[in-house]
Image (cartoon, rainbow, N blue to C red):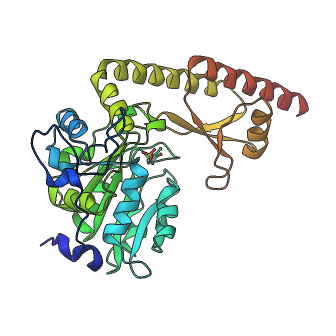
């Protein structure tokens, strides 16, 4: 039997949540003298602490209930809250499959939680044998699965993910920051099949709102209630909530832009294939491409001198660059620069 309360940190179990003025009042009102706000201005009122309008819209799009959605100040807030809700600092542990998104490590360190890094296998898939050495550790509370994975770009094999969801006694966070670019299915449809599943998504990538800082978590309402209890009461500003609502109004535009990016990605892959410089192109279900080159540090630096910034992942995957799919113009500029480097290197050889 899965008992959620046995996974919640004792101090959080006892927590008396902050009750804001707007939490205690429900209904229609005209005179607000309850929150020490200034009566003048357009942004003088505190934002909706429950982000109800966003949740209503998202629940329709994602086919979940509104009480199965949490809205965070970016998914980075979701990641931090997961540590704070489930991990006792200095005692509990979390686990990731490396290489992966850097914030799990940073958030674990900030919360004084040991992070176990289980290396992915040669095809960047989850190595279940390697994982099994840790999966029954009593202090292991969290497993993060980033799928599609950043920086490798692949969507993890479903059998492995389901094995973890079925076997692990703690919480499984599936980070789907790139799921909109993928042809594969989201795990949001599974939140009621697994009592330990949290899916997190973001408005920062396919939705084009990285500057807005809004992310979402989807889980059963019991887990979502713990998020609501621990979050700062007004974690998403009025302006940011409005920006998300405006974007959700126009899902057609979202689809158009996403398809342009996916088309550009296919074009970039074809052009990388023609470059001698590029030794390997990893398959990607995201809006970036991981490529292997002869000397990533050198190519990265040469591109910098031409004011083109890529992500040098040499330290995590030898001689690999992670390249975001940009606009047609940006991608053309990158390819042109790489063609020039290609020619000069060939000339040298
Ligand atoms: C970009 C990214 C995010 C986004 O985080 P936000 O705080 O929502 O901007 C989350 N997870 C992964 C794996 C990412 O690559």
Residue 183 shows in the view: no
Q: Position of residue 287 (x, y in %)?
A: 48, 33
Q: Residue furthest left?
A: 27
Q: Position of residue 267 (x, y in %)?
A: 54, 20
Instruction: Say if 310 sits above or below 171 in the image.
Output: above
Which residue is drawn at the image coordinates 44% and 81% (left, top)?
90
Image quarter of residue 202:
top left
Which residue is drawn at the image coordinates 47% and 63% (left, top)?
107
Q: Position of residue 11 (x, y in %)?
A: 29, 78
Q: Quadrant of the C terminus?
A: top right
Image-based side of 132 in relation to 20, left or right: right
13 or 283: which is nearer to us? 13
Which residue is drawn at the image coordinates 22% and 75% (left, top)?
13
Q: Position of residue 37 (x, y in %)?
A: 32, 46
74 or 142: which is nearer to us? 74
Instruction: Say if 107 sits above or below 266 in the image.
Output: below
Which residue is drawn at the image coordinates 35% and 79% (left, top)?
137
How many discs mark residues in the rendered view?
Answer: 0
Residue 10 shows in the view: yes
Q: Quadrant of the N terminus?
A: bottom left
């Amino acid at each position: 039997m899965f008992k959620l309360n046995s996974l919640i940190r004792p101090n959080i179990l006892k927590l008396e949540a902050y009750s804001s003025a707007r939490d205690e009042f429900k209904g229609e009102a005209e005179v607000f003298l309850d929150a020490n706000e200034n009566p003048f201005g357009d942004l003088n009122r505190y934002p909706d602490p429950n982000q109800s309008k966003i949740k209503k819209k998202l629940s329709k799009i994602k086919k979940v209930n509104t009480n199965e959605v949490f809205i965070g100040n970016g998914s980075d807030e979701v990641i931090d809250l997961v540590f704070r809700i489930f991990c006792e600092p200095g005692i509990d542990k979390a686990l990731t499959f490396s290489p992966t998104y850097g914030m799990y490590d940073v958030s674990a360190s900030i919360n004084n939680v040991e992070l176990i890094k289980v290396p992915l296998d040669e095809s960047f898939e989850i190595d279940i044998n390697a994982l099994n050495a840790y999966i029954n550790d009593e202090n292991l509370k969290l497993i993060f699965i980033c799928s599609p994975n950043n920086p490798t770009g692949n969507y993890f094999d479903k059998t492995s993910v389901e094995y973890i969801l079925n076997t692990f006694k703690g919480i499984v966070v599936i980070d789907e920051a790139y799921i909109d670019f993928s042809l594969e299915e989201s795990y949001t449809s599974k939140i009621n099949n697994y009592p330990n599943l949290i899916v997190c998504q973001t408005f920062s990538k396919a939705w084009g709102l990285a500057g807005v800082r809004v992310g979402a978590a989807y889980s059963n309402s019991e887990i979502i209630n713990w998020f609501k209890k621990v979050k700062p009461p007004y974690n998403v500003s009025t302006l940011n909530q409005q920006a998300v609502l405006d974007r959700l109004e126009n899902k057609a535009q979202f689809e158009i832009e996403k398809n342009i990016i996916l088309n550009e990605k296919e074009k970039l892959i074809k052009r990388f294939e023609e470059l001698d410089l590029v030794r390997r192109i990893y398959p990607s279900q995201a809006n970036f491409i991981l490529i292997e080159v002869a000397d990533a540090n050198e190519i990265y630096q040469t591109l910098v001198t031409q004011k083109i910034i890529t992500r040098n992942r040499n330290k995590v995957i030898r001689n690999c660059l992670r390249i975001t799919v940009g606009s047609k113009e940006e991608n053309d500029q990158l390819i042109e620069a790489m063609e020039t480097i290609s020619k000069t290197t060939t000339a040298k050889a």
